[in-house]
């Protein structure tokens, strides 16, 4: 009877050992598990083994790179990659203005041999006119008696009068008088500019005559 009992115990031990080995081989895919058994009266009952689901890896560490024009964000393995680029190129530099004018925006009157400035913009507050003409064009400023007393016309870039400007030379004998007209012919040179302004109101009355 004792021998039979020992054999049964030995067999039960072997079963338990085999079960433990099997449970150990499953430990790589389970997060946790329990094995329970009860031996009573020479009978061994093998408990159940329960394991949780396998471990789930998280995405790799993301990285963020910032640069001019946008930001690039990259998730690690298992994640997604998102790239966002925004921005705009620098706009072209604004043209340099002379007396509020640029040649690109000047009124083209190259087909006119005599240009009467005051027909386009009266010589009063406020005056702003930019015109493109041919070299040798006749230029005229008209006014009423006293116009060139209140608004003396000079050539030059505000606020500095240019004594050598054809505008200044032509207007000099009229300024301060009851004269009603300043008229002069431009030199024949092309690619020139002749800025002018009121020597009293400066930037409130200004313009440029360009030659093509």
Image (cartoon, rainbow, N blue to C red):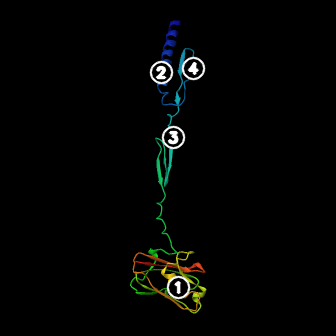
Q: Earlier in the sequence, mark 3 or mark 2?
A: 2
* Foreground residue among 84 and 205: 205
- Distance from the alpha carbon under mark 2 to that under mark 4: 18 Å
Classify residue 133 as left or right of residue 141.
left
Q: Earlier in the sequence, mark 3 or mark 4?
A: 4
The residue wearing badge 4 is: 38
Of labels 3 and 4, the one closer to you? 3
The residue wearing badge 1 is: 171
- Distance from the alpha carbon under mark 3 to that under mark 4: 47 Å
Of labels 1 and 4, the one closer to you? 1
The residue wearing badge 2 is: 21
Q: Does 187 sit above or below residue 31? A: below
**Quarter holding the C terminus?**
bottom left
Of labels 2 and 4, the one closer to you? 2
Q: Quadrant of residue 174?
A: bottom right
* Foreground residue among 36 and 134: 134
Q: Are marks 1 and 4 in contact (CB under 8 Å)?
A: no
- Distance from the alpha carbon under mark 1 to that under mark 2: 114 Å
Q: Earlier in the sequence, mark 1 or mark 3?
A: 3
């Amino acid at each position: 009877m004792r021998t039979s009992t020992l054999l049964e115990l030995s067999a039960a031990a072997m079963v338990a050992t085999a079960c433990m080995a099997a449970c150990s081989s499953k430990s790589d895919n389970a997060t946790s598990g329990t094995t329970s058994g009860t031996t009573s009266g020479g009978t061994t009952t093998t408990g159940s083994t329960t394991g949780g689901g396998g471990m789930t890896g998280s995405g790799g560490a993301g990285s963020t790179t910032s640069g001019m024009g946008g930001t690039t964000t990259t998730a690690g393995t298992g994640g997604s990659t998102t790239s966002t680029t925004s921005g705009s190129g620098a706009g072209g530099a604004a043209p340099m203005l002379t007396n509020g004018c640029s040649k690109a925006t000047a009124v083209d009157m190259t087909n006119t041999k005599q240009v009467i400035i005051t027909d386009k913009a009266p010589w009063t507050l406020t005056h702003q006119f930019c015109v493109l003409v041919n070299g040798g064009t006749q230029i005229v400023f008209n006014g009423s008696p006293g116009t060139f007393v209140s608004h003396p016309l000079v050539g030059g870039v505000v606020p500095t009068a240019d004594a050598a400007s054809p505008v200044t030379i032509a207007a000099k004998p009229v300024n301060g008088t009851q004269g009603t007209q300043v008229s002069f012919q431009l030199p024949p040179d092309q690619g020139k500019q002749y800025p002018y302004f009121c020597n009293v109101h400066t930037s409130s009355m200004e313009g440029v005559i360009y030659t093509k």
